[in-house]
Image: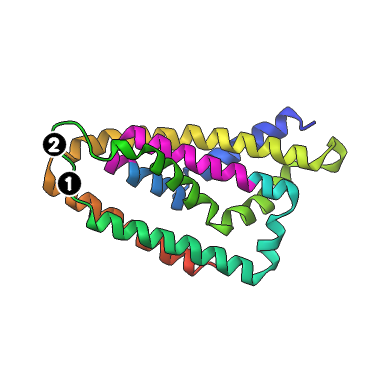
Amino acid sequence: MIPIDALMTFFIAAALLSLAPGPDNVFVLTQSALYGRASGVLVTLGLCTGLLAHTTAVALGIAVIFQTSAVAFTVLKLVGASYLLYLAWLAVRAVPAPLNGVSSTTRSFGALYRRGIYMNISNPKVSIFFLAFLPQFASPERGSIAIQMMILGAIFICVTLLVFGTIAMLAGILGERLSRSNTTQRYLNRIAGVVFAALAMKLLTTQQ
């Protein structure tokens, strides 16, 4: 199958790409700062579930549709941007959590996980990125291209879990200290709202 040296090169490239500032790691950072480390980890798991869907799409060739069809690309882009604007609205309207150490958001862990999935799947750029990135490390001489795509996608997901999980833990620690003040919580929520709105605008202005 894929040689070890090629896998190591892919691993390093994936780690550098995961560390580069982008919508997903910014999303994890803001959610961790607002709702705690566990919430950030759950959002990360949701994002990685979305990556699994994108990997499967690339392996099956479905991602080509978003690369060649302007209508499909635009529809998914609008859905993603609308969802981000909805999150911005929720963040701006959010009220400070109780300061007794029990956050009112802890019951919404399932919603945070789904939020990560929606955030990732609704971005057609991820599928197109995978379509351009993964094949560089695959070769027909090594067997099934689809299987190689799945292996590379799995490695990318593991790297993302490691990098984003670290971001979630660090941002969660900082967020726990900052959220001890109701005023600080309001500012954090407003900052999150601005971040979501900016991500929505960025997504709306992306081209195929």
Magenta: predominant secondary structure element? helix
Figure coloring:
rainbow
Instruction: In the displayed orientation, state which residue is furthest to the top.
Output: 4
Mark drawn on residue 173: none
Is disc 2 surrounded by few (<14), some (14 to 19) or many (20+) residues within 10 Å? few
Residue at coordinates 36% horizontally, 60% vertically from top-left?
86
Image coordinates of residue 103 in percent, x first then y, are: 22, 36
**x and y, in percent, of residue 56 in the image:** 68, 45
Q: Nearer the viewer, residue 117 or 123?
A: 117
**Could you tell whether 152 is left or right of 24 in the image?**
right
Q: Nearer the viewer, residue 202 or 73?
A: 73
Q: Is residue 207 visible?
A: no
Q: What residue appears at the point 74 percent right and 48 percent down from the top-left corner?
A: 60
**Magenta residues?**
32-54
Q: Secondary structure at mark 1?
A: loop
Q: Amino acid at mark 1?
A: Pro
Q: Is residue 48 magenta?
A: yes
Residue 179 lies left or right of residue 64; in this view the side is left
Q: Which residue is mark 1?
A: 96
Q: Are dots 1 and 2 in contact, CB under 8 Å?
A: yes
Does the magenta run of residues contain 53? yes
Residue 186, x across and y down, in percent? 18, 51
Q: Which mark is residue 99?
A: 2
Q: Residue at x 69, y 35 (%)?
A: 151
Q: CA distance from mark 1 to mark 2?
A: 8 Å
Residue that appears at 80% across and 31% down: 1
